[in-house]
Image (tube, grey):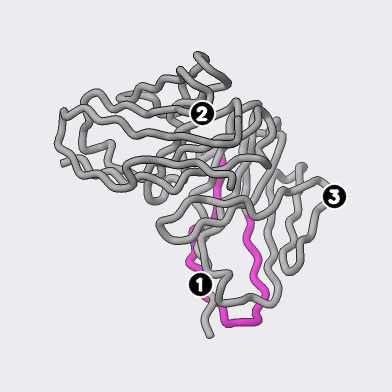
Amino acid sequence: RKEVEQDPGPFNVPEGATVAFNCTYSNSASQSFFWYRQDCRKEPKLLMSVYSSGNEDGRFTAQLNRASQYISLLIRDSKLSDSATYLCVVTEDNDMRFGAGTRLTVKP
Amino acid sequence: EAQVTQNPRYLITVTGKKLTVTCSQNMNHEYMSWYRQDPGLGLRQIYYSMNVEVTDKGDVPEGYKVSRKEKRNFPLILESPSPNQTSLYFCASSRPGLFETQYFGPGTRLLVL
């Protein structure tokens, strides 16, 4: 079983749609949680941290459910520029564990 | 501008020919690491370094070496590359334990024939 699992997609949605991604992790002792965005053939970039209380940044909302060991990312009012691969990241001590990513394509 | 640089960005080589991928950061970060990214597997950590002269294995260290003689540089060395090391490699740096500060380099795409 992978330590961090994501649905690889692809998710193909029209502009303006709301889309949600989930990610599950296996280590209940995981400490920090993040969503990264990766454009094709480029480096991952931090999108947002995920806190137990949930957090929102504009059109993006991230939530953490420690009991069920999953985190989610909700994107509202999708833009063409949101097309990318979204990586779920979980930390254990000094180690970062990456999911394989969920690919999103937003179409006109 | 805060950045992590890697060189070369693209490399085609042959089995057994030693190569080095350089990584340099200008943020005075103590923590640096190397990852490889393969389709369907996500990023996997190869080696990491908590500070100068302190390095440790990640999840997939076989076939790789690293050194940390200076704070800003963390080269990745493939002594005898093999085709299964064909991959996309990323270097990253951050403050220890502060993953929100992590920056990735632009990546090095390696093909071993």
Image position, residue B5 (x, y; %): 45, 42
Which residues fall within the magenta stretch? Answer: A4-22
| Dot 3 alpha-carbon crowd within 10 angstroms: few under 14, some 14 to 19, many 20 or more | few
Q: Which residue lies furthest to the top in this view?
A: B53
Say if labels 3 and 1 share a chain. yes
Q: Residue furthest front?
A: B1
Q: Residue B16 carries which label?
A: none
Instruction: Specify the label residue A53 is tagged with.
Output: 3
Looking at the image, residue B6 sits to the left or right of residue B19; the answer is: right
Distance between the alpha carbons at the discs numbered 3 and 1: 29 Å
Q: Read off the residue under disc 1.
A: A105
Give amino acid for label 1: Thr
- Identify the subunit bearing mark 1: A
What residue is rendered at 52% in x and 51% in y?
A44
Task: Please check the rendered image and state whether residue B31 is part of the magenta-colored stretch, yes or no.
Answer: no
Tell me the SS state at disc 1. Answer: strand
Q: Which amino acid does label 3 sit on?
A: Ser
**Residue appearing at x 64%, y 30% in the figure:** A92
User: Disc 2 versus disc 3: distance between alpha carbons?
Assistant: 36 Å
Q: Position of residue B66 (x, y in %)?
A: 39, 22
Where is mark 2, residue-wise? B72
Q: Do the residues labelled 1 and 2 touch (CB within 8 Å)?
A: no
Q: Position of residue A14 (x, y in %)?
A: 57, 82
**Residue occupying the point 18% across, 39% down:** B13
Q: Do labels 2 and 3 share a chain?
A: no
For the point 76% across and 54% down, which residue is it?
A63
Question: Closest to the observer: B56 or B20?
Answer: B20
